[in-house]
Image (cartoon, grey):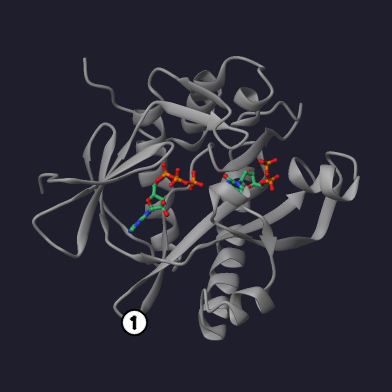
């Protein structure tokens, strides 16, 4: 299916309409941003790596019973997806403390969180995606209680599936962010699962292999994403 008009330009992806009102094309761009867009760079191959990485993960999740929007790869950096009505919230699970929680609670990076934590954030760049709780979601009508329960249980199911998948590849799934939306009467996982929206460390050395390499100016960002893809067996293909 061909992409038609541009509907939305996000920080890392562009969203296009298609002939089918129920389908969208997601174009994964090379643009990379951090700190609410203050740090920005275009990184060669990122769009293609993330698109194909996301396709691999979404397919594994669907096989494991996590319903999601992914339909097919339609180009090296484009995928066809179901068009969802997105909830304006982000679901974050942490297995190991890093990033925001260390600053917020003054805890040391690297401590195990057992059981893992679950946090909601409001998707609002102007407000810097503030942390919210279920009462805010209920009072402001951002989602129904039953939707909240579904998002939580699917987010934890993703943890079970992906902790194992990454662990088998010698990687620790430190934390990740998911977004969900409604398609007819079903809640589906949307957006993306890539090293842009999660933290992955080498299990032996704890070397960072995710977007923290960009945030912290460590270099070798895409090389790290490709290393993760190679270890998982993601078949990366690039146009000549
Ligand atoms: P952020 O980086 O904070 O997620 P953004 O809008 O800049 O925000 P992008 O990934 O660049 O993020 O843009 C993609 C947009 O498309 C997001 O707003 C996301 O919620 C939305 N989206 C993802 N999947 C779907 C889908 N299946 N149906 C409708 N919208 C979607
Ligand atoms: P967090 O540590 O709260 O924020 P930061 O990465 O800015 O220090 O993020 C936890 C994980 O969720 C991390 O892997 C990044 C991801 N995430 C996003 O990709 N986008 C978001 O808007 C949020 C809140 C988190």
- The residue nearer to you, when weighing 204 against 151, is 151
| Rendered position, 163 above or below 189 | above
- The residue nearer to you, when weighing 174 against 151, is 151
User: From the Cβ of disc 1, is ligand 1 less than 8 Å away?
Assistant: no
Instruction: Tell me the residue at 57%/64% (across/down).
Output: 155
Q: Toward which corner of the image does residue 12 lie, by quadrant?
A: top left
- The residue nearer to you, when weighing 209 against 118, is 118
Instruction: Tell me the residue at 29%/33% (across/down).
Output: 77
Instruction: Tell me the residue at 90%/40% (across/down).
Output: 108
- The residue nearer to you, when weighing 137 against 127, is 127
Mark 1 residue element: loop
Q: Quadrant of the C terminus?
A: top left
Q: Toward which corner of the image does residue 169 lie, by quadrant?
A: top right
Q: Position of residue 191 (x, y in %)?
A: 41, 52
Instruction: Tell me the residue at 19%/65% (across/down).
Output: 22
Give the residue number, with chain letter if any, for mark 1. Answer: 185
Q: Residues within 10 Å of mark 1 (few under 14, many from 20)?
A: few
């Amino acid at each position: 299916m061909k992409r038609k008009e541009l509907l939305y330009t996000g920080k890392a992806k562009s969203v296009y309409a298609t002939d089918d009102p129920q389908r969208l094309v997601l174009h994964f761009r090379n643009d990379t941003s951090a700190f609410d867009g203050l740090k920005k760079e275009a990184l060669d191959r990122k769009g293609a790596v993330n698109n194909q990485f996301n396709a691999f993960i979404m397919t594994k999740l669907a096989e494991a019973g996590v319903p999601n929007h992914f339909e097919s790869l339609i180009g090296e950096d484009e995928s066809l997806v179901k068009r969802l009505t997105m909830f304006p919230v982000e679901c974050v699970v942490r297995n190991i403390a890093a990033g925001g929680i260390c600053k917020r609670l003054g805890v040391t990076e690297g401590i195990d969180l057992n059981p893992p934590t679950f946090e909601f954030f409001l998707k609002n760049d102007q407000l810097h995606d503030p942390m919210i709780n279920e009462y805010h979601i209920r009072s402001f009508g951002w989602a129904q209680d039953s939707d909240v329960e579904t998002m939580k249980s699917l987010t934890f199911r993703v943890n079970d599936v992906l902790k194992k998948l990454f662990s088998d590849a010698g990687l620790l799934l430190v934390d990740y962010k998911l977004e969900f939306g409604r398609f007819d009467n079903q809640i589906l996982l949307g957006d993306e699962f890539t090293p842009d929206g999660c933290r992955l460390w080498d299990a032996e050395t704890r070397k960072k292999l995710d977007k923290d390499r960009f945030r912290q100016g460590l270099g070798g960002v895409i090389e790290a994403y490709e290393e993760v893809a190679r270890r998982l067996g993601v078949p990366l293909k690039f146009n000549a």
